[in-house]
Image (cartoon, helix red, strand yellow):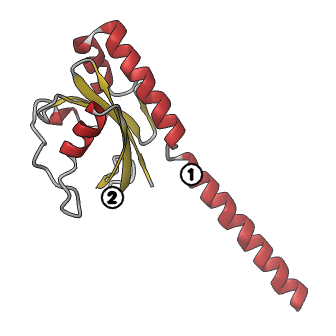
Amino acid sequence: MLKSKFAMLMVAGAVMTASSAAQSEDYGTADEATALLEKAVGHVGSAGNEQAYTDFSTTGNDWQDRDLYVFCFDKDGKVVAHGANAKLIGKNLMKIKDADGKMFIGELISTGLGGGGWVDYRWPNPVSKKVEQKSSVVKQAGADICGVGIYK
């Protein structure tokens, strides 16, 4: 009986581990987000803002990967590119708040202008359709600030 319970626990543990590994494959990593951002900043430099922002905002290309996508703001908080929701382009989000009431767009912009880095907030995940904890890495790209976020 004890061996049978132990075997069941081992099987349950293996299933949970496999399920967790499969779920983690649905989410981008911090390293993948950073690599996509570096690629995006390079694309702005080589293709120019207009073409790069069009590319970032067009779905079904190399600028979206699972829950990872490129977004860009001008210094005033206006969305100039968004890989998950093109309807946001042209909208000023400076006063928008996350699910906890944090006005995070200004922090994204100031972090990007200050040399780049990570900002934490809660935001709807386009894959799960749920509000989740998100961290975005941002960096200045020309006159604007671009970023890529990961959901945790």
Q: Which mark is residue 53?
A: none
Q: Which mark is residue 24?
A: 1
Q: Tally the marks.
A: 2
| Amino acid bearing label 1 | Ser
Q: In the rendered image of this protein, does residue 87 appear above or below residue 141?
A: below
The one nearer the camera, 8 or 106, is: 106
Mark closer to the chain start, 2 or 1:
1
Residue 146 percent coordinates (x, y): 30, 29
Residue 53 percent coordinates (x, y): 26, 20
Residue 135 percent coordinates (x, y): 38, 49
62 with respect to 147 (left or right): right
Residue 7 visible to the viewer: yes
Residue at disc 2, secondary structure: loop
| Amino acid bearing label 2 | Lys
Residue at disc 1, secondary structure: helix
Mark 2 lies on residue = 130
| Image quarter in which the C terminus is found | bottom left
> Label 2 neighbourhood size at 10 Å, few (<14), some (14-19), many (20+)?
few
Q: In the rendered image of this protein, does residue 23 appear above or below residue 57?
A: below
